[in-house]
Each structure stands twice: as C-alpha cells, then as structure tokens.
Image (tube, helix red, strand yellow):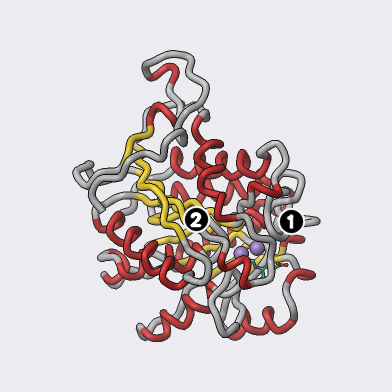
Amino acid sequence: MTKVDLIPGAWSGRDDGSGPAHLRWHSAMSAFHADIEPGATVLVGFRSDEGVRRNKGRPGAARGPTALRHALASMALATPIRVFDAGDVAVAVGHLEDGQRRLGDVVAGLLDAGHFVAVLGGGHEVAYGSYLGLSNSAAGTSGARLGVLNLDAHFDLRDDPAPSSGTPFLQMADAETERGRLLNYAVLGIAQPSNTAALFARAVSLGVPYLLDDDCGAANLPAVESFVDEFLRTADLVHLTIDLDVLPASVAPGVSAPAAFGVPLEVVQRVCDIVARSGKLALLDVAELNPKLDFDNRTARTAARLIHRVVTWRAPVG
Ligand SMILES: N=CN[C@@H](CCC(=O)O)C(=O)O
Ligand SMILES: [Mn+2]
Ligand SMILES: [Mn+2]
C-alpha cells in the first residue's frame, strides 16, 4: 500500500486550538503513506462481521472501525505521537477468508516497514487476519518466538468446518503446526459458563494457559500480573488481542455476547500497560465492538481508552 486517503469525517472532534497544548487524536492523525519514518503507529480497520454471523452471533461489528475512530478522535494526547490511518479492509458477505488474507498482507507490509500496527475490528475473526500479518512478516519469520495474548471471555478454539469469530486461535494453532511450531497462546478472562467442557479440554490439549474471570478481579491483581509476566517470558514478539466481551457489560454492552461478570476495566488496563511496556508488543487488535448494540458509545469509549493507553504507553520492540 502506498497512499491512503483519510476516511471523510472520521477524524474530527472537539478542537480547543492548535499546538501541543491542545493536541487530540484527530489533530495528530494523518493519512498513511509509504514514505513515513519507521516507528509510527498505524491503524487499520477490519470491516467484518461475517465471522460473527457464521458463529451465530449478533452481527454489527462491521461498523466497529468507524465507531472506534470517532471515539478516539477527541481523546487528548499528553504528548505528541506519530499516528497514521491506513483505512479499512472490508469483508464482503461470504468472503471472510479472502478478507483475512488481505488484512494479513496489509499488516505484514506495515510491520515490515517498521511500524506498530493497531487493527480496529470487526468480529474476533480479525485476530486470524492479524496473525497472518505477523507470522508472514520479516519479524515473524526471523525465528523470534511469537506469543498471542487474548483478553476474552471465550477460548475461540472452535473446531468448525468454516472459519468464524469462534475459530481464530485454532486456525492459528493449525497454521503454527504447519510451520513446525507450537502456538504460544494464553487467555485471560475466561468465563466458565460461556465455554463448554469440550473447549476447556481443547485448551488443555493445546497447552493453553488461561485465567478464569473469577480469578481476574482487582483483588487478584498480583496473580494476574504474574500470569502476564510468565507469558511475556515465553515470547519475543507479542500479538495482543482484546475481545471487548472480556469486560463487564456495564462498560462494554455493545458486543455480540455481553459478559454478566467480566474482568474489571482497571485489571484489563493494567494488563495492557504491562504488555505495552514490555518492549515486545508488535501488534494489537480490538474486536467485537458492535455499535448497533452500544449505549451512549460506552463500549466504543472503553475500547478507545484501551487503544489510547497501549499506543501512548508502548515501548518500541527490541
Ligand atoms: N468470538 C466469539 N466467540 C464466542 C461467542 C459466544 C456466543 O456468541 O455466545 C464463542 O464462539 O464461544
Ligand atoms: Mn469473546
Ligand atoms: Mn473472542
């Protein structure tokens, strides 16, 4: 990709004046082009709910990227950042696999150009497209140990005939096996009532470390931090994927499967901080925002805060 125009109207919002004292995302944002210096943050939207539809969920996540841009636009920046928008990869009904391949190509190109990539979903099928990008990038094929950390109420390890929002991590596991590797996949926030015994058994057979939502409360923060530290010890290059249904429905109602219990936002944010500061985070994606089901843009604002946090706290890889 070379030059992308900013999506009209996406990056506008409250404006208190020019200069660094009044900086917000909309004034820091530029359209992506191929000549930018390495080390920027580049946003890519994945306009898909084909995976949610196939997984018998409530469609609407295709409009997630637009809502996330709007929620980010007016957020104030304490210090300047270099951030670019590379536009959207759109998925047509029935053509998820093609969309995931196209997202993978875009992400790989951006990573190879030395940028940090934040993908705005889309259903959680976004994670497999993101993974394709990282695993096919120069860094992903360099022998570095890949690690995927999923903040999610669900394992998304379904063994279904067609890819969906419920299958991305089994797809990754299969792809890693084909490369002669084992997928390094950990999940934080699993809701026991939302995952069958068969899914728990598959996670165990794949050696997936996980923490239940019951064990991710604010009082459990030291154990959550240890879990994340242990994961980070096993990986050189991290893909952080946030399914917004990991959060309580009070702060994230606008998802296909809202959480009755959920992991508190302060815990999710703390995990984001640790991963962002690790010097290993190459790729972020945020999944499952469904603006049709949101109230007062609550979920979009929660998601935008987490993206803001990761982008502004991130230490460069290496
Ligand atoms: N990405 C979502 N995955 C969940 C959805 C569960 C639901 O719709 O209730 C899953 O497949 O388990
Ligand atoms: Mn989920
Ligand atoms: Mn998920």
Q: What residue sits right under mark 2 in the picture?
A: 47
Mark 2: few/some/many CA within 10 Å (<14, 14-19, 20+): many
Q: Nearer the viewer, residue 64 or 191?
A: 64
Horizontal and vertical percent position of residue 20 = 38, 19
**Is 83 on the left or on the right of 70, as rendered?**
left
Q: What is the three-letter code of the residue carrying label 1?
A: Pro
Give the farthest residue toward the top: 17
Count of labels in the image: 2
> What distance separates the C-alpha of mark 1 from that of mark 2?
20 Å
Disc 2 is placed on an element classified as: strand
| Residue at 42%, 36% in the rendered image | 8
| Residue at 57%, 61% in the rendered image | 49
| Residue at 70%, 36% in the rendered image | 296
| Ligand 3 visible in quadrant | bottom right
Pointer 1 or 2: first along the chain: 2
Q: What residue sits right under mark 1 in the picture?
A: 258
Q: Are marks 1 and 2 in contact (CB under 8 Å)?
A: no
Q: What is the three-letter code of the residue carrying label 2?
A: Arg
